[in-house]
Image: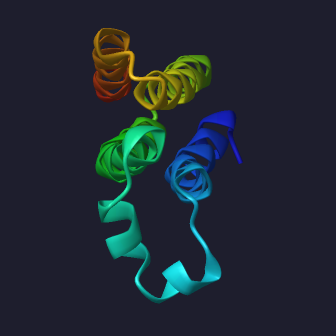
Amino acid sequence: MTLAYWCVFIAMLLPWIAASYAKKSGGFSADDNHQPREFLARAEGKAARANAAQQNGYEIFAPFAAAVIIAHATGEAAQFTINFWSILFILSRIGYLYCYIQDKSFARSCIWGLGVVCIIALYIAAI
């Protein structure tokens, strides 16, 4: 399994980490597990921002995973290139989570853009 495929695995885990942080920082209890989405919908502050980061993580996962798979499948991209853009994507997502939770909106948007650039670069590498 390539490093880029491991990055897809890590990208899958990041929304779960954000959700766990949202629940922990929001005071989630066993009773809240009956309606966890309602609990998160009422969250405020860092918990609400972590939940929003979780949702964005699910939204961006499919394009990233597809780009990695396509870059591998075409055979046109060098493995180093696929790995580079995949690692940079993961680093951007970690930075995105941090900026979102810390309410650094401008930095968050810039880092989100970097993640999109990584995805586009993977598609271009597949050509």
Instruction: Please tell me in which quadrant of the rendered image residue 68 appears.
Output: top left
Instruction: Specify the farthest residue to the bottom.
Output: 34
Q: Does residue 74 sit above or below 112 in this rendering?
A: below
Above or below 62: residue 7 = above
Q: Quadrant of the C terminus?
A: top left
Q: Give the camera-side residue of 32 and 116.
A: 32
- For the question of whether residue 73 can be seen, the reply is no
Is the residue 41 above or below the residue 9 in the image? below
Task: Decide if residue 80 is in sight here.
Answer: yes
Residue at 33 percent across and 23 percent down: it is: 112
Along the viewing direction, whichever of 8 and 126 lies nearer the viewer: 8
Left or right of 5 on screen, residue 126: left
> x, y (%) of residue 87?
59, 24
**Residue 9: % across, % down:** 61, 51
- The residue lying toward the viewer, choosing from 91 and 118, is 91
Query: Looking at the picture, how far across and down is residue 6, in whole percent?
Result: 66, 44
At a point 52% along the width and 21% down the height, the residue shown is 95
Where is residue 90 shown, x and y percent of the image?
A: 55, 29
How is the rendered protein coloured?
rainbow
Q: How many marks?
A: 0
Residue found at x 57% / y 17%: 84
Q: Name the side, left or right, on which 8 lies relative to 121.
A: right
The quadrant holding residue 99 is top left
